[in-house]
């Protein structure tokens, strides 16, 4: 049986979950000056297996990944290792993503525009039991839990879309060109076109302008 990694000299142990290798490398380099980065994973299955074995203090978790996304990782680990704390670190600042992760048990949610020093501070606060949010995102959580505390965030139409399709839709609705979406998500323009086609088909719409209005109505932009 694999023993959990222990902290050395009182340093916090952190595990990174993100499907972009270059982003993980950047976070590891910056965050490693403040905490002990004990592992990383690029898929849901790999994350669940390695986090369970290592049992870090805090998991930095991307929201949108293949095979169920960050929420699938969070829910699986919380069932077996409830002491592990999660801080979402995502490109998405959509209300549905923030609220969904917090309802699932994350202790905080920050966007990838955060500075290295701010991220290190956020990790320490989460490890200490605090809740941490980027300023704009805190309002989403307060509104959701104050006005509709017992109502889960659900949308049958939105649930048809994969995590990657939601990311493409959100950027499209913000006015990004296909080339810009491809660069932002580290995918090809052809893949962007395929995702847009799938979204249009699933939502029974004919163009990006209808998609933009639809996304705005649901506060996805």
Image: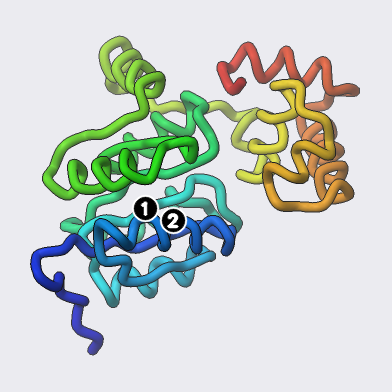
Residue 74 in the image: above or below residue 162 = below
Q: Write down the residue under mark 1.
A: 60
Mark 2 or 1: in front is 2
Q: Is residue 42 above or below residue 163?
A: below
Residue at position x 19%, y 57% in the image: 82
Local SS, label 1: strand
The residue under the point 81% across, 44% down is: 192
User: Which residue is disc 2 drawn over?
Assistant: 27
Of 178 and 95, nearer the camera is: 178
Circle 1 Cα neighbour tier, 10 Å, few/some/many (<14 / 14–19 / ≥20): many
Q: Quadrant of residue 87?
A: top left
Q: Position of residue 213 (x, y in %)?
A: 73, 12
**Residue pictured at 32% horizontal, 66% vertical:** 37
The front one of 121 and 97 is 121
Q: Return the residue nearer the eye: 127 or 162.
A: 127
Query: In this image, 33 relative to 156: left or right?
Result: left
Q: Is the N terminus in the top left, top right, bottom left or bottom right quadrant?
A: bottom left
Q: Label 2, label 1: how many angstroms apart (C-alpha)?
A: 10 Å
Q: Position of residue 49 (x, y in %)?
A: 38, 74
Instruction: For the residues labelled 2 and 1, say whether their Cβ atoms are less than 8 Å apart.
Output: yes
- Going from N to C along the chain, the mark reached first, 2 or 1, is 2
């Amino acid at each position: 049986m694999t023993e959990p990694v222990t902290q050395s000299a009182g340093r916090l142990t952190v595990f990174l979950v993100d499907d972009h290798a270059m982003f993980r490398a950047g976070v590891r380099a910056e965050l490693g000056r403040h905490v002990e980065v004990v592992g990383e994973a690029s898929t849901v299955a790999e994350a669940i297996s390695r986090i369970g074995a290592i049992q870090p203090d805090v998991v930095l978790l991307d929201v949108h990944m293949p095979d169920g996304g960050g929420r699938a990782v969070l829910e699986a680990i919380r069932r077996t290792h409830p002491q592990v704390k999660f801080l979402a670190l995502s490109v998405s600042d959509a209300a549905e993503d923030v609220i969904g992760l917090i309802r699932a048990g994350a202790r905080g949610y920050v966007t990838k525009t955060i500075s290295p020093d701010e991220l290190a501070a956020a990790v320490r606060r989460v490890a200490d039991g605090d809740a941490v949010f980027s300023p704009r995102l805190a309002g989403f959580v307060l509104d959701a839990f104050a006005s509709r505390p017992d109502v889960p965030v659900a949308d049958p139409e939105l649930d048809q879309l994969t995590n990657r399709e939601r990311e493409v839709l959100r950027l499209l609705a913000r006015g990004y060109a296909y080339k810009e979406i491809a660069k932002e998500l580290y995918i090809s323009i052809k893949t962007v076109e395929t995702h847009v086609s799938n979204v249009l088909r699933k939502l029974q719409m004919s163009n990006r302008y209808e998609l933009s209005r639809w996304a705005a109505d649901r506060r996805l932009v």
